[in-house]
Image (cartoon, rainbow, N blue to C red):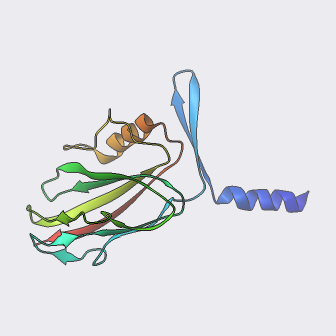
Amino acid sequence: MRVFLLALAAFLSACTLTLYPEGLSVTYRVDFGGAILRFEPDRGRGATYFVGEEVRFFLTLDRPGWVSLVVQDPDGYTYELDRFHLSRGTHVLPPGPYRYTLTPPRGLHRVRAVYTQSPPSSRVRLEGRYTWDARLRLYVEASGARAYDVAETYFYVR
């Protein structure tokens, strides 16, 4: 019995249970670790690019799901760059012949990869000037996803 309890404790120490009160009921989210294992620009985190150059991103997932790329530019404006359904493994984004060509404003660009296990809702958009955490929670709740993950990277445009 002691071995079982030790194994259960070790298993549960690697997960997170989050409860959200909703009126008379409670919803939950169990997370056994992040779905996003790697997320960075093709030149590395904090790299410098110039206006007119192209940037790509390396993203590694430990399970399939939906990923939205969200950018916050130096002016504080946030927008959803792209949305993909991806398999488990490493991906180069955007896929295929598509490219992200950099335009002004110059300065620090923060990019977030938002993973959800179910498709994002078209009712909630990640666009505008807002408090990131509050808007992200609405975005995830609208998708109905029980599991989600967020990874952030950044680069500079000169």
Compared to 137, does 156 lie above or below?
A: below
Judge by depth and name the residue closer to the eye, 137 or 59: 59
Q: Residue furthest right?
A: 1
Judge by depth and name the residue closer to the eye, 95 or 141: 95
For residue 19, which quarter of the picture? top right
Compared to 94, does 65 lie above or below?
A: above
Residue at the location (58% across, 25% down)? Answer: 25
Name the spot of residue 140 as percent of width and height, x first: 42, 41
Name the spot of residue 96 as percent of width and height, x first: 31, 65
Quadrant of the image for the N terminus?
A: bottom right
For residue 127, which quarter of the picture? top left
Compared to 122, does 34 lie above or below?
A: below
Residue at the location (17% across, 52% down)? Answer: 76
For residue 74, which quarter of the picture? bottom left
Quadrant of the image for the C terminus?
A: bottom left
Q: How many marks?
A: 0
In the drawing, does residue 87 fall left or right of residue 129? right
In the drawing, does residue 35 fall left or right of residue 77? right
Residue at the location (9% across, 70% down)? Answer: 52
Name the spot of residue 89 as percent of width and height, x first: 49, 67
Name the spot of residue 72 as percent of width and height, x first: 22, 55
Q: Residue furthest front?
A: 97
Compared to 34, does 144 lie above or below?
A: above
